Image (cartoon, grey):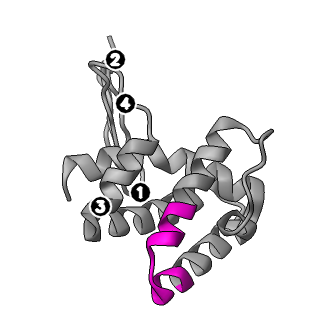
Amino acid sequence: MGAEIVQLVGQAGPAVTAAVGAYGAAVLTRAQDAAAEATVGLGQRILQLLWRRGDEAGRTELERVVGEAVDERDDVYSAAVLGRLLRRALQEDPVLREELSALLPAPAAGAVSVTASGERSIAAQQIGTAISGDGHTLPRS
């Protein structure tokens, strides 16, 4: 998977999750509310972009995934499911990558994206000591 796709999903993921949390499955067809929070509005536009670009099978899958995210009360799970859907769509459609890039704000110069994936994973930009896993001990000073 390309770094560009990872960055786009990292930027878009929180907005998509917020939109699903705020509007539920209606996020796919709801007209944008002028009073909607910026993140929710952005997430809604991203999901509607996916909706418009998809074929019938893609729309059905998007409806199913959004419905699962609505029913799930775990934001981490919802973000992961929505992120996988977005990542797959971006991998398959270079025009969608361009359209999504145009929607998202440009990353700040020197911005760092850190991703951790998997059970008990950790991610940090700056850290002294990080130990993950079972059976480790730290020497005492």
Report the disc number at residue 106. 4
Mark 3 highlights which residue? 95
Q: Residue 115, image x and y in percent?
A: 34, 43
Magenta stretch, residue numbers:
48-60
Residue at 43% x, 33% y is 105
Q: Is residue 69 left or right of residue 130?
A: right
Q: Quadrant of residue 94?
A: bottom left
For marks 4 and 1, the one nearer the N-term is 4
SS at circle 1: loop
Which amino acid type corresponds to the residue marked 4 in the rendered image?
Answer: Ala
Q: Is residue 86 magenta?
A: no
Q: Is residue 25 above or below residue 117?
A: below
Residue nearer the viewer, 55 or 40? 55
Residue nearer the viewer, 124 or 68? 68
Q: Residue 42, image x and y in percent?
A: 58, 45
Q: Is residue 53 magenta?
A: yes
**Which label lies toward us, 4 or 1?**
4
Residue at 55% x, 45% y is 14
**Which label lies toward us, 2 or 4?**
4
Label 2 to label 3, Cα distance in Å? 55 Å
Label 2 to label 1, Cα distance in Å? 27 Å
Q: Is residue 22 left or right of residue 76?
A: right
For marks 2 and 1, the one nearer the N-term is 1
Q: Is residue 38 above or below residue 44?
A: above
Mark 1 highlights which residue? 119
Report the disc number at residue 140. 2
Label 3 to label 1, Cα distance in Å? 33 Å
Mark 1 and mark 2 in contact (Cβ < 8 Å)? no
Which amino acid type corresponds to the residue marked 1 in the rendered image?
Answer: Glu
